[in-house]
Image (spheres, grey):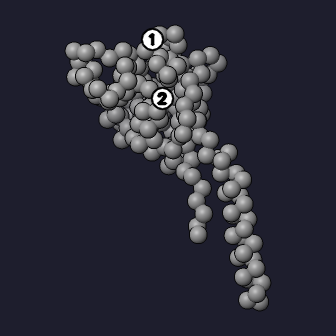
Amino acid sequence: MLYREKSREKIKKLFIDIYIKLWQPLYMNKTLIFEGAGWEKASSASDIGNCRIRTRIKNNDGEIIYLEMMGRKKSEWSTYGRKKNWSDFVGFVFHCHTGYDSNKMNQYCKLEIGTIISWDAKTLIEWVNKNLNCSFNSLRVENDGVQVHNTKLPLCESLPPIKNKD
């Protein structure tokens, strides 16, 4: 009996190892998808692909969050424009809230006021992951065909990585 239990445990561990090695790369390809809501040819689109973007995501906790942002060329006379390590563009958060009611106050609403970031894809992914409890690893802006306001479903989901218990 003890031998069977050990065999079952070994088979279970082997199955988990194989599952993680084969499926985790597919599972880990989590792309943060935005609808392009501005002009994709604007200089302020930078490497993001549009000067105004919006999305509805599902974060690691299963919360649905609406996020809308805009980027523009930074100016030398502004405080954020003098940051030397930033790209040539800055981004602003217009809307950030859970659910579908923008009037409902929640923990993410505070990000709407005064949030200014460097407007480049790498920084935007890092900001979303840190502030909205996500784990995206790439970004894509759809300038045609995707419309956030035509559905209540998230455009993308951030699921926590699968971890082996051993």
Q: In this rendering, is residue 165 above or below 131?
A: below
Which residue corresponds to mark 1? 43
Report, in whole angstroms, how far the alpha carbon at label 2 lies from the one at label 1. 15 Å
Do labels 2 and 1 touch, CB within 8 Å? no
Q: Quadrant of residue 10?
A: bottom right
Q: Which residue is mark 2?
A: 121
Tell me which residue sits at (36%, 41%) in the image.
Answer: 107
Question: Is residue 124 or residue 112 the one in the foreground?
Answer: 124
At mark 1, the secondary structure is: helix
The residue lying at 55 percent from left, 43 percent from top is: 158
Q: Residue at x 50, y 17 (%)?
A: 50
Three-letter amino acid code at the position of disc 2: Ala
Disc 1 marks a residue whose amino acid type is Ser
User: Is residue 32 shown above or below 74?
Assistant: below
Q: Quadrant of the N terminus?
A: bottom right
Q: Identify the image quadrant of the C terminus.
A: bottom right
Q: Position of residue 95 (x, y in %)?
A: 40, 27
Q: Is residue 16 left or right of residue 108?
A: right
Disc 2 on helix, strand or loop?
Answer: helix
Report x, y in % for residue 53: 49, 22
